[in-house]
Amino acid sequence: MNVRIRILQQLAIVTLLPGALLPGVLVAADDAAGENPLKLTLPPWIYAVPGVELSVYFDNVVLTEEPHSYEFEVDCTIGRTEDRRWTVIPRITDVGQIPFSIRVRNSDGKLLATASSVLRVVPHEAGQGKNIRLLIVGDSLTHATKYPNEVARLLSQPGNPGWTMLGTHRPPSAGEGVAHEGYGGWTWVRFVNQYEPHPDGTYRKRSSPFVFMGDDGRPQLDVQRYIREHCDEQPPDFVIFMLGINDCFSAPPDVPAGIDSRIDIVFEHAGTLLADFRKAAPNAHFGICLTPAPNSRKQAFQANYKDRYHRWGWKRIQHRLVQRQIESVTAIRDGSVSIIPTQLNIDPVDGYPTNNGVHPNEAGYRQLGASIYAWLKSRL
């Protein structure tokens, strides 16, 4: 069945304070009975910068194995709708805050779900003349260093602040000035608790960069010490967390309560790490990356995991994790902590290789970098 997609034009522009909460738009999706069969989910804010492409891929915002069987209607005054996505390269004249919404219908035209957000197009020169210190914390997606390289490339273009990337990890693939704390297989839990008394110089056998032996002879989380010893005693202005895949990948996909139980544990440790960072860097902005949607190809998961893990299983876990991430950050009600909508702007087909379920290709990593860059500009 071919998808019929219509873009609807809306003339109204809303004016909202940056960082303001938008009641009801986080998972504002309903059918006539008040249910949400597709779990249509949008974050409260979507960020964009003139000249940098932004997309919302429909497969990434609904929970279904057959997104092609539905009709997606996008309501926004800019951009265009294609077969699998809505996309835009904003112009300077688009700067501002623009309502954005999606409606989903079945093949008979029945409205199944709706969700709303606000597209914030940030001035190209936001932050120009400033100097910022940036720390990225993550797992293998960060370890690959491709999206940190893209963030650095975009920040190095005219109209941007001067920048310094903090971190003790500088893989051979890192561009000039690029560093981070990203390690393959790592989790929120590991960054909070991992202490290795006998490190071997590899990322697999090492302590968390934020965990040190205390005066009482016990390992302890100490972000202030990390900043003192590895950041020239100057805290970061921005801290970005790209974590969650390894924490939740083995959750039971057929047991919703089991998924939520695993996410509860993740959030407990995420809260601990975030609290210590906020204490050590009270003036910093903290960005929580929404866990990227997976490769759309079932065979990519078969290539990686044989029969242990499947695409639909991880999709159910990932989608629930994204919903909970949005709910959790919103509950903090602190403008210093916000969502980076990295799950929207990654192509689940062309942003991944044919043989990897969760690790993007070059194009996909660039899309992640663009999302993070737009968020950074919005904070500036």
Image (tube, rainbow, N blue to C red):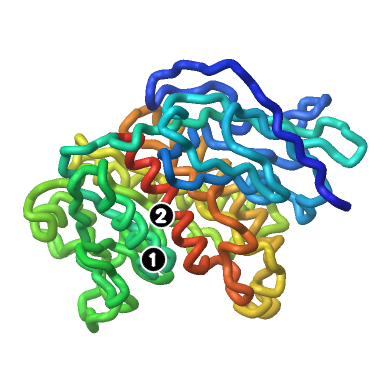
Q: Which badge, 1 or 2, is on the more N-terminal residue?
A: 1
Camera-side residue of 272 and 69: 69
Say which element carries label 1. helix
How far across and down, in percent of the image, does residue 171 sit? 28, 74
Real-space Cα separation, disc 1 to disc 2, in angstroms: 8 Å
Would you place residue 164 above or below residue 25 in this image? below
- Graded by Cα atoms within 10 Å as few (under 14), some (14 to 19) or many (20 or more), the crowding at tag 2 reads many
Task: Please name the residue shown 15% across and 46% down the image.
Answer: 235
**Mark 1 touching mark 2, by CB under 8 A?**
yes
The answer to which image quadrant residue 293 occupies is bottom right
- Graded by Cα atoms within 10 Å as few (under 14), some (14 to 19) or many (20 or more), the crowding at tag 1 reads many
129 left or right, relative to 361: left
How far across and down, in percent of the image, does residue 153 sit? 31, 57
How far across and down, in percent of the image, does residue 169 sit? 24, 68
Amino acid type indicated by mark 2: Gly
Amino acid type indicated by mark 1: Lys
314 left or right, relative to 93: right
Would you place residue 311 above or below residue 93 in this image? below
Pointer 2 residue? 369
How far across and down, in percent of the image, does residue 94 sit? 47, 29
Query: Quadrant location of the C terminus?
Result: top left
99 left or right, relative to 52: right
Would you place residue 297 above or below residue 305 in this image? above
Would you place residue 334 above or below residue 281 in this image? above
